[in-house]
Amino acid sequence: GELLGDQAITTAILDRILHRVEIIHLNEDSWRMKHRKTIFGQQSVSN
């Protein structure tokens, strides 16, 4: 609601966009997050 200034309009737009979406649950750790480098050195970050 903050993005468009009206929560009802934001909900309606998201409803139109997401009405045919399939949700896929992945139980694995994110490859991107697992192999991301930290700003403190070369160690990888884990959740």
Image (cartoon, grey):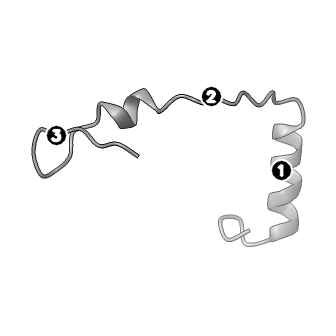
Mark 1 or mark 2: whose residue is earlier in sequence: 1
Residue 1 vertical placement versus 29 (above, below): below
Q: Dot 2: within a 10 Å radius of its alpha carbon, few (fewer than 14), some, or many (20 or more) residues? A: few
Residue 5 found in image quarter: bottom right
Tag 3 or tag 1, which sits nearer the N-term? 1
Which mark is in front, 1 or 3? 3
Q: Spatial distance from mark 3 to mark 2, Cα to Cα?
A: 24 Å
**The image quarter in which residue 11 lies:** bottom right
Residue sitting at 28 percent across and 36 percent down?
36
Q: Earlier in the sequence, mark 3 or mark 2?
A: 2
Question: Which residue occupies 41% across, 46% down?
Answer: 47
Residue marked by disc 3: 43
In the displayed structure, does residue 37 sit left or right of residue 47?
A: left
Q: Secondary structure at mark 3?
A: loop
Q: Secondary structure at mark 1?
A: helix
Of 29 and 10, the residue lying toward us: 29
Q: Amino acid at mark 3?
A: Gln
Residue wearing tag 2: 26
Residue 14 image offset from top left, x and y in percent: 81, 49
